[in-house]
């Protein structure tokens, strides 16, 4: 790109320099001028079948690559992105959403332009609630400053931003102050406060015998996985992760004990964590899905450290002026105590005895078999429902290899996410675990994977409807129309479909899929509707208990 910029070229140049090499979305007349610039830029546009899929793809791309982006037209496209952007906001994924909008000049002549909802700022007002910066680039004099302000917020908070460009301003010339994008702001913590916070952690730990570390998704979003592993090894302390944070440490690490989530975690893990005498939670959202009881109990006793990107809390007070990243790094470099090894809870809850080839396929043998197939090139992408609950006990081999909307829990994330992962890191092989209900929402995005020669393995857990909801309240509203999922490959003109009713068929289909890196594979796994993973049973029981508690 030349050094003479327009608002459009400046934005694309900044994004490319920050590492955004692919942008997902669907064009429309309000954004076509910008699309032409994307085509002329080094950023590759990936057309999707729906805008929300573009959002999920950009979110997954961002989770792997550090920044993701989508570009859509005004309102009909933009507002289709709301759910995906809300997911990115809730789960801290740095996604840039760009939308075209009516030109400023045409607004004067006609206030009722197509795609408008209420007034010209309606779409921006919506996104203001679910982004960390929402900007309309309607002035060439302020465009550079506004773009950089938004990008800084994206980098600092790891949450989405919204940038809108009226179509007649895309080519407006801009005199730039700098040709370089803003830098991620380095250590801004108050050194004295940081020192004091770390000393307090040290003091807390020195009076402890059974500390446990509980790590969450922010470790991944801020790229602190190596620091975390170093900290765990130095302290020789057992570590659990939340469901959303699953895989922030490689799960075959000897100190990793499993997923701790009040709703989904195994009883042994819950007991072990709740038996701790000091809890160090790092980058963990304490959501109702996680339901961190240990935190509640130990907090009362003043034996918790709860560090997140929003605040650093030790015992009953918080430290102003201490950043999350700095805090984690300082814990690694400061001499924290090391603890004697302890007996850890048993690991292999998914271990199973393979049945004969004629045996009916069950969730237990699907997940038991899948567990043995994971390698360090696999990225497991779990949708909502059994795909997520049963996957909680899978052992992911290295960090950053488990993606799921485990907190926001929007169905339909997984197949579009596989598309995003395919571009973010082509060396990874996505293994998509998706329920039949969720697949019916966005499974057709597989079309785009096939179009670009990607080869995800998509396991459709076909239990004839909304099993998760059935556990809570059975009714005909949980039934869905039966599809022949394996035939989607015929419809889309690529990939191989497998109909899987027995364990033998499962093994054969997965072996074929794993050995064939050249194309997508879709497995229609025919489960008994009453089949239910242990994890789902735990969730259902605990939810029922919680509901009963609320009634009394
Ligand atoms: C977009 C969206 N709509 C509705 C829900 C509510 N919901 C949660 S789980 C579920 C059923 C999921 O069905 P399926 O994908 O087949 O998975 P299963 O529960 O059968 O394993 C529903 C409808 C949701 N989480 N997300
Ligand atoms: Mg289902």
Image (tube, rainbow, N blue to C red):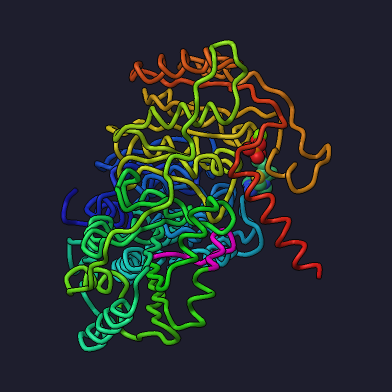
Relative height, residue 276 to residue 11 (above, below)? below
292 inside magenta stretch? yes
Picture residue at 58% right of the left edge, 30% below the top: 363
Relative height, residue 364 to residue 408 (above, below)? above
Relative height, residue 303 to residue 239 (above, below)? below
Relative height, residue 463 to residue 227 (above, below)? above
Residue 168 appears in the figure: no
Instruction: Give percent across and percent down for residue 436.
Output: 63, 31
Residue 362, image quadrant: top right
Q: Nearer the viewer, residue 264 or 62?
A: 264
Instruction: Give percent across and percent down for residue 343.
Output: 36, 55
Number of numbered callouts drawn: 0
Q: Nearer the viewer, residue 225 or 120?
A: 225
Specify the quadrant that holds the C terminus.
Answer: bottom right
Q: Quadrant of ligand 1?
A: top right
Instruction: Specify the segment rendered in magenta.
Output: 283-293
Picture residue at 61% right of the left edge, 42% below the top: 385
Picture residue at 56% right of the left edge, 31% below the top: 364
Task: From the viewer's perspective, tell me whether residue 535 is left or right of residue 549.
Answer: left
Instruction: Give percent across and percent down for residue 463.
Output: 67, 29
Task: From the viewer's perspective, tell me whether residue 74 is left or right of residue 371.
Answer: right
């Amino acid at each position: 790109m030349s050094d003479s910029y327009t608002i459009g070229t400046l934005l694309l140049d900044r994004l490319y320099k920050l590492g955004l090499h692919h942008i997902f979305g669907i064009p429309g007349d309000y954004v076509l001028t910008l699309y032409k610039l994307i085509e002329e830029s080094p950023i590759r546009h990936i057309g999707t079948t729906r805008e929300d899929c573009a959002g999920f793809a950009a979110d997954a791309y961002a989770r792997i690559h550090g920044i993701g982006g989508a570009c859509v037209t005004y309102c009909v496209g933009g507002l289709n992105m709301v759910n995906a952007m809300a997911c990115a906001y809730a789960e801290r994924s740095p996604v840039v959403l760009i939308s075209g909008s009516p030109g400023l000049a045409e607004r004067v002549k006609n206030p009722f332009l197509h795609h408008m909802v209420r007034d010209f700022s309606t779409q921006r007002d919506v996104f203001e609630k679910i982004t960390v910066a929402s900007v309309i680039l309607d002035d060439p004099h302020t465009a550079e400053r506004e773009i950089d302000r938004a990008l800084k917020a994206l980098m600092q908070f790891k949450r989405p931003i919204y940038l809108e460009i009226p179509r007649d301003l895309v080519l407006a010339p801009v005199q730039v102050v700098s040709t370089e994008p803003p830098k991620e702001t380095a250590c801004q913590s108050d050194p004295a406060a940081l020192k004091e916070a770390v000393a307090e952690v040290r003091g807390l730990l020195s009076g402890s015998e059974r500390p446990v570390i509980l790590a969450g998704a922010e470790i991944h979003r801020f790229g602190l996985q190596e620091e975390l592993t170093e900290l765990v090894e130095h302290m020789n302390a057992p570590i659990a992760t939340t469901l959303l944070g699953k895989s922030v440490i490689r799960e075959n690490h000897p100190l990793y004990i499993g997923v701790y989530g009040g709703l989904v975690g195994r009883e042994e893990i819950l007991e072990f964590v709740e038996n701790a005498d000091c809890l160090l939670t790092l980058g963990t959202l304490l959501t109702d899905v996680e339901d961190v009881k240990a935190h509640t109990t130990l907090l009362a006793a003043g034996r918790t450290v709860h560090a997140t990107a929003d605040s650093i809390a030790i015992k009953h007070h918080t430290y102003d002026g201490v950043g999350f990243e700095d805090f984690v790094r300082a814990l690694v470099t400061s001499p924290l105590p090391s603890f004697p090894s302890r007996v850890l809870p048993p690991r292999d809850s998914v271990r199973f005895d393979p049945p004969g080839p004629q045996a009916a396929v069950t969730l237990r043998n699907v997940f038991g078999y899948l567990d043995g197939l994971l390698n360090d090139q696999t990225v497991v992408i779990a949708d909502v429902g059994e795909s997520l609950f049963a996957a909680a006990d899978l052992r992911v081999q290295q960090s950053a290899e488990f993606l799921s909307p485990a907190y926001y829990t929007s169905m339909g994330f997984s197949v579009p996410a596989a598309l995003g992962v395919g571009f973010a890191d082509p060396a990874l092989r996505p293994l998509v675990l998706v329920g039949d209900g969720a697949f019916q929402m966005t499974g057709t995005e597989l079309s785009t994977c096939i179009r670009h020669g990607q080869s995800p393995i998509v396991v459709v857990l076909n239990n004839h409807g909304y099993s998760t909801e059935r556990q809570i309240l059975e009714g005909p509203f949980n039934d869905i129309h039966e599809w022949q999922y394996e035939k989607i490959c015929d419809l889309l003109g690529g990939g191989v479909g497998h109909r899987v009713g027995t364990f033998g068929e499962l093994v054969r289909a997965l072996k074929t899929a794993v050995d064939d890196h050249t194309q997508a594979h879709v497995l229609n796994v025919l489960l008994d509707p009453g089949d239910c993973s242990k994890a789902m049973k735990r969730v259902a029981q605990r939810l029922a208990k919680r509901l009963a508690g609320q009634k009394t």
